[in-house]
Amino acid sequence: MWLKSLIVASLLQVSIAGIAHAKGPFGSVNVGNWIGGAFSNDETGAFSHCAATTPYANGVILVVGYSAVGTWSLAFASPSYRFKQGENAAIDVIFDGQEQARLFATANQPNMLTAVMPANVVRTFQKASLMVATSGRTALNFDLTSTGPVIAALANCVTKVKADGLDKAGDFTKGAAKPAAMAEKQASPPAGSKAARAKSGTGFVVSANGHIVTNNHVIDGCVGDIKGNLTGEASMVLRVVSSDANNDLALLQAPSTTTFKDFARIRDRSIRSGDSVIAIGFPFHGLLSSDFTVTTGIVSSLSGMRNDSRFLQISAPVQPGNSGGPLFDATGQVVGVVTGKIPALRIAAATGNIPENINFAIKTGVLRDFLDNSVVPYQTAEPKGELKTTEIAGNARAYTMLISCNATEQAEAKR
């Protein structure tokens, strides 16, 4: 009896506005173990939201809601919860072991936390089979069977009630859009928006906590999720921690559930002109190898264009997609962040000569200042015995990432 009462109470209380006095359900949503319908504000009689709920063996009830103003919500309810009114909590959710998002929930009732679900999270929730929700030290698994039809039914519920009124509410699962069509519709960009295209670069892990360095221009203009892939492994959604457009650096964070035993160490001694260097990255991803590429060269100069002391000039060949990748010395320590190559056509037009093997990397001094300002627990190391290039590449495989996202054409043009 307590379970039925809690489910009904959860359905009534899920509205983002925290409406304590709600009435319903009007009509019905019945999909698998999910039940629900439409609800009104009992004080005004106005349509408030549509919601559906299902209980789990772990003692938690999931409640999905879609408000009259078009806001999606996800709530976690349990008779064992004892929250203070207005208490907040961060909940990390992982879908199918890959896609991750952080939800910020509020306790509108003592036994329930409710969070807004952004559109991209709704689409993932709709298509996923398993969700792991983590808050503090508590991690719970949820089988997401039938979430696709439930999302479609709730969207149908709001559309029909707004058009026909609560008095004509019926079975909202009938006539609901198919899940795939629903996802495609939600994913479509609004009219008049800039088209998006895939872009990619390289990044590398600099701490056991999953801090990842790349170039700012790699993530600039990204819309939606930024993803990171270690070679041969599933992608993970990365969070932007900080960026420095002036020095072309960005710091990303891997999901909190991810730890790295291996990560890059930064050389704690100045490099010299003529020293050997190795560049690793993912140039022309989708056209060349899906694995990273390795190129070698030397430090040609200790300054960049117009004597810019923040950069190294290197002869190791790099291409679009190498940006943000690690530059190693012969002992396997990071001595720079690859940032780009000289604009050959522009120089050729100005001088009549095509430049060769003139590329640049951000020095470790600039990198360390950036990491210090972001309070990253990176590690430094002194160069010791030289390693073979194959050994350096083999070690780098554990922490060198393909960074990818969708970006507006306008942002790509600036790049």
Image (cartoon, rainbow, N blue to C red):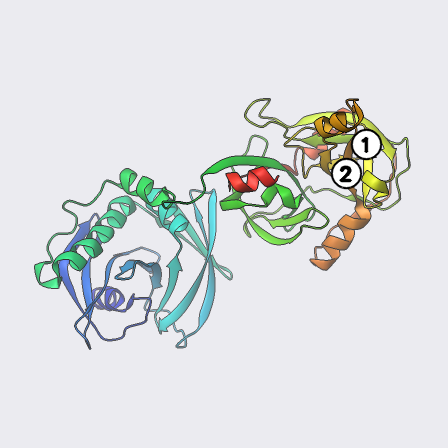
Contact, CB < 8 Å: mark 2 with mark 1?
yes
Q: Quadrant of the N terminus?
A: bottom left
| Residue toward you, 395 or 67 | 67
Q: Is the residue 130 above or below the residue 91 in the image?
A: above
- Please state which amino acid type lies under the numbered disc 2: Ala
Q: Which residue is drawn at 41% across and 68% down?
A: 106
| Image disc number at residue 361 | 2
Circle 1 residue: 314
How many C-alpha atoms fall within 10 Å of the one at disc 1: few (<14), some, or many (≥20)?
many
The residue that appears at 65% across and 50% down in the rendered structure is: 251
Q: Is residue 224 left or right of residue 163?
A: right
In this rendering, the answer to whether 247 lies above or below 44 is above
Residue 232 rendering spot, x and y as whole percentages: 56, 30
**Circle 1 — which element?**
strand
Q: In x, y percent, where is residue 136?
A: 51, 62
Disc 2 crowd rating (10 Å Cα; few below 14, some 14-19, many 20+) is many
Quadrant in the rendering for residue 157: bottom left
- The spot of residue 262 in percent (x, y) is 68, 41
Q: Above or below — where is 37 with respect to 127?
A: below
The one nearer the camera, 291 or 224, is 224
**Kind of residue indicated by mark 1:** Ile
Residue 304 in sight in this render: no
Residue at 58% in and 35% down: 200
Label 2 SS:
strand
Which residue is at 59% across, 31% downward? 231
Closer to us: 82 or 367: 367
**Visible residue check, residue 306:** yes
C-alpha span from label 2 to label 1: 7 Å
Question: Along the horizontal axis of the image, is 153 left or right of 253?
Answer: left
Left or right position of 329 against 225: right
Quadrant where the image shows the C terminus? top right
The image shows residue 110 at horizontal and vertical percentages of 35, 74
